[in-house]
Image (spheres, helix red, strand yellow):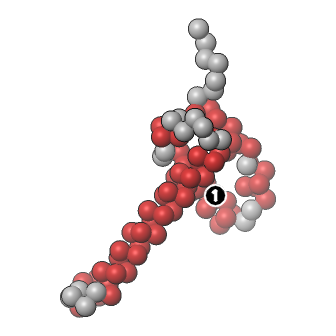
Amino acid sequence: MGRTLPSIAQVFLGEQEAFSRFRRALRRSDQLVVDDLFASAQKHLAATAYAAHALPFETFLLAMLLEEHKETMRLRQLIEEMLSPTASPSTQEQT
């Protein structure tokens, strides 16, 4: 029997295509950011397939937010390490 529902990858590509006109209206630098957000959502398609109760795009947004938050946490940790009184001056100069 054939599939009755599209795969999550097909849904993702459809959502990405639905935003193509929005993307084209943006500045080139913003287009690259939108591309990066969709790329970060694409990393989590397997997990998205398990979120059957949510709308697909809500799950894609959550995946984008997840990647952005991971980066924020990484940068916070880096700042804390740089500001730590136990950090050696040579470590602070290298970063």
Q: Position of residue 67 (x, y in %)?
A: 48, 58
Dividing the image into 4 quarters, which one contains the C terminus?
A: bottom left
Q: Position of residue 94 (x, y in %)?
A: 29, 83
Q: Identify the residue at horizontal 73%, vertical 55% (top origin).
A: 23
How many neighbours does mark 1 have within 10 angstroms: few (below 14), some (14-19), or many (20 or more)?
Answer: some
Residue at which label 1 appears = 34
Q: Is residue 37 above or below residue 29?
A: above
**Is 80 on the left or on the right of 8, as rendered?**
left
- Residue 89 shows in the view: yes
Q: Identify the residue at horizontal 58%, vertical 35% (top origin).
A: 52
Q: Position of residue 66 (x, y in %)?
A: 50, 57
Amino acid type at mark 1: Val
Q: Identify the residue at horizontal 48%, vertical 40% (top origin).
A: 47
Q: Secondary structure at mark 1?
A: helix
Q: Identify the residue at horizontal 72%, vertical 65% (top origin).
A: 27
Dividing the picture into quarters, in which one does residue 15 lie? top right
Residue that lies at the very extreme toward the top in this rendered image: 1
Q: Is residue 43 above or below residue 69?
A: above
